[in-house]
Image: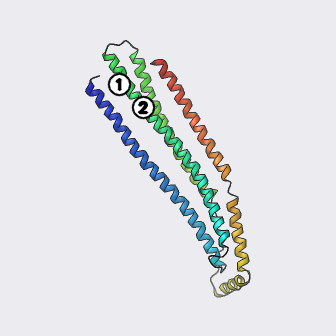
Amino acid sequence: MSKQVSKALLEVVNEMSDVESTISKIDGVIFVRENEQMIKEKISYLYNLLHAEAKFYNQKQDTLFDITEQLVDNYKQKLNLVYDEFYCQYVNIQNEIQDARLNQKIAIINYQKIINDKENGINRNYNEIEKKLNNKYELYSQIIDKCNKKFKECKLNFDKKMNEAFLIESSLIVANNNFFSKLKNKVFNFFKGAEKYKSVVDNYNQKVNDIDTKSIINEMRNETIQFITDILKIRRNDEDELEDAI
C-alpha cells in the first residue's frame, strides 16, 4: 500500500474519531437536558398539586410548610436516585459503543498492515485474515446496533417507571360550582379545612414513601449487568478467533 493511501486511510480514521466524539458529546448534552427537565416537571407538578389542595381547603400556602417541603424533597431524592441509575445505564452503553468503534478502527489499521505485508512479499494467509478482519468490523457494527437498541429499550423502561411508579394522582374532586355548593365547602373548610388538608398531605406523603426505588434500581442494574455480560461474551469470542488467525 502506497504511503499516500496509508496516509489517506489514517486521515479517514481520525476524521471518524472526531465526528463520533462530537456526536457523542451532543447526545450526552441532550440526554442530561431531557431527563433533568422531566424531573423538574414532576417536582413542579407535585408543588402545584399541594398548592391546589391548600387552596381547595382554604389553607395558606405555608400551612404545613415543613412537612410539604420534606415530602417534595423525598420525592425529588427518589427521582434522582432512579435517574442516576439510568445515567449509569447510558454511560455503560455508550462505553460499549465507543469500544466497538475503537475495535472497528483497529480492524481498519490491521487491514492496512496486512496489505503492506502482502505488497512486501511476506508469506501469510491473507484471504483468511482479511475475512476475519471483515467479520470483526461487521460484528462490532452489530454490537453498536445492539447498544443503540438497548438504549432505546432502557429509555422506554425509564419513562414507564417515571410515569407509573412516580405517578402522584390528585385527590381533588371536581366540585359543583353552584352557590350552595360553594357555601357548603366554605363552611366545611372553616371548621375542618386544616384537618382535612393535613390528612391529604399525609396521604401524599405515604404515596411518596411507598415508591420502591430500591426494587426499581436493582432491576435496572441487573438489566445493565446482563447486557454488558452478553456483549463481553461476543467480544471475547471474536478476539480469540482473530488472535488465532493473525
With respect to residue 237, does 59 lie above or below? below
Q: Quadrant of residue 42?
A: bottom right
With respect to residue 194, does 225 lie above or below? above
The image's colouring method is rainbow
Q: Give the side of residue 204 with respect to residue 120, left or right.
A: right
- Quadrant for the N terminus, please: top left
Q: Which mark, residue 112?
A: 1
Q: Which mark, residue 104?
A: 2
Q: Which amino acid, mark 2?
A: Gln
Where residue 183 appears, x then y in whole percent? 67, 87
- Quadrant for the C terminus, please: top left
Q: Nearer the viewer, residue 67 or 152?
A: 67
- Residue at 49% of width from left, 18% of height from top? 244
With respect to residue 119, does 186 lie above or below? below
Element type at marker 2?
helix
Q: Quadrant of residue 186?
A: bottom right
With respect to residue 48, does 58 lie above or below? below
Q: Give the side of residue 119 with respect to residue 22, left or right.
A: left
Q: Which amino acid, mark 1?
A: Gln
Where residue 227 appears, x then y in whole percent? 58, 38
- Residue at 35% of width from left, 34% of height from top? 13
Element type at marker 1?
helix
Q: Earlier in the sequence, mark 2 or mark 1?
A: 2
Q: Residue furthest front?
A: 66
- Residue at 69% of width from left, 62% of height from top? 207
Q: Quadrant of residue 121?
A: top left
